[in-house]
Image: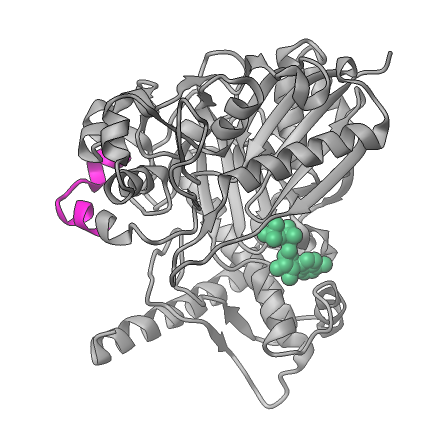
Amino acid sequence: MERFILSLDQGTTSSRAILFDHEGRIRAMVQEEFTQYYPKPGWVEHDPRDIWRCQLKTGRLAIEQLGIRAEQIAAVGVTNQRETTIVWEKESGQPVYPAIVWQCRRTAGMIDKLVEEGWSEKIKAKTGLIPDAYFSASKIAWILENVDGAREKAEHGELLFGTVDTWLIWNLTGVHVTDYTNASRTMLYNIHERCWDDELLDLFRIPRSMLPEVKPSSCVYGMTKPFWFGGEIPVAGAAGDQQAALFGQCCFQPGEVKSTYGTGGFMLMNTGRQAVASQSGLLTTMAASLGDEPEYALEGSVFVSGAVVQWLRDELRILDASPDSEYFAVKAKDNGGVYMVPAFTGIGAPYWNQYARGMIVGLTRSTSKAQIVRAALEAIAYQTADVCEAMEKDSGLDLMSIQVDGGASKNDFLMQFQSDVLNAVVCRPACVETTAMGAAFLAGLAVGFWENKEEIKQLWSVDALFRPQISADKRSELLDDWHLAVECALRWGNAKRERTGK
Ligand code: ADP
């Protein structure tokens, strides 16, 4: 009887279910989008019942697509949009409020106040995070403060909190758990002592009884109720999407990095047993690991990655489709001295300046459309290189290679240029579903479907490798010019703010 792992990949805009076989191949995949709610400017919500229904449906359809029975599924793995916050009644299972999505900015004021009160260093030391409305803590506090009767019920132990992994696992099995990686994004979890932090719970006025038990990312959390998939299946893996992708990319050793090129960019570096405190504005977070021993990662993001190509396509309309960017970049032969800094909403690590704005510099009468497109793709690579350099500096680990995924990683020009400016090998895997694959690996390892990490590495195959092809002198020349361009974008933002006060 052939057996499979069912991976449930619950993303921000859609839910997906993928069945992997023992060779790590995708045998069935079903995806469904669900509704996004924007009740006020800056607010983003989901209906938790939609999330659950849509996820269950994709799981059932994937099983149907392959024509298999529940006993052929060795385990279920879950990976999820991180930080999104759900509070529900323990008894009835009914959410007391919609899910507050990670993007939602409604609690920005609450966080500003804590920063003014001087909490930043303490929060960073305990949780590895820079205080922000993005993380779950202030979202839970908001629900308790604003939903009628919620605080009272919470104090009587009648409410449960969960990130999306917890919500799904609770619905699937009835068990209230989360894993290290998701816990480490709540801003309530002490990543060094590995416990919910009493001082932070007091600060946000969150009763401990609401919180799930925190377990490793690879272990049996519970069995699915038989009516969901036609039989009991162990739910045995869970990790937040970025950490699942790091695991799915087989970045098991300290110094190994995965870089995702989606709308935004996400880089995670495995730092092994060591939780590295960043001096450059990166986050310290927990990585998915096997067993109880914790592993850590440094995380950095680029606000505008593939989105700059979208901008060329949809706003400037100089591209019909995103993949065409490669044709123009190659045609240009070089950037002709043109640099683009896509700081549309400020610039993140390692600069952290919210006033910086986008800029194209070095224009001449002979600048071509192809060079502008090339400058946009190069900017994606430069921004990634800046984050990687910060990671190397913070961790003291040398970056030899990076594993890539996400929509824009299909662009060969971009990947070659990335390798050139990083002076590292860029490795693009054959299976680009690295997030779902990570959750499948974690679940499969917990139940002995796969033996160990070595076996998993064998399943993993390379689509393309890109090796550095430019000289050290050329690399420094390019990076020096890029940094000059960033400085212009920063100066512009700062000067404008000084003059106008905004
Ligand atoms: P997300 O999951 O964040 O929505 P995806 O991983 O699907 O994003 O990647 C989509 C992004 O990648 C878009 O911004 C798109 O412009 C960009 N993109 C897709 N294909 C290419 C390509 N071949 N070259 C450059 N950019 C691309």
Q: Quadrant of residue 277?
A: top left
Seen at 56% across and 75% down, the residue is 338
* Furthest residue in direction left, as rendered: 117
Q: Position of residue 460 (x, y in %)?
A: 74, 28
Seen at 57% across and 32% down, the residue is 79
The number of callouts visible is: 0
Is 7 part of what is drawn in magenta?
no
Image vertical order of residue 91 relative to residue 43, above or below: above
Q: How is the image coloured?
A: one colour
Location of the C terminus (image quadrant): bottom left
Q: Position of residue 170 (x, y in %)?
A: 50, 23
Is 117 part of what is drawn in magenta?
yes
Q: Position of residue 133 (x, y in %)?
A: 32, 47
Q: Seen in the image, is 207 located left or right of residue 412?
A: left
Q: Main secondary structure of the magenta part?
A: helix
Q: Position of residue 404 (x, y in %)?
A: 64, 43
Q: Seen in the image, is 270 located left or right of residue 198?
A: right
Magenta region, residue range: 112-124
Seen at 52% across and 11% down, the residue is 291
Frontmost residue, 148 versus 434: 148
Residue 286 seen in this snapshot? no
Frontmost residue, 189 versus 375: 189
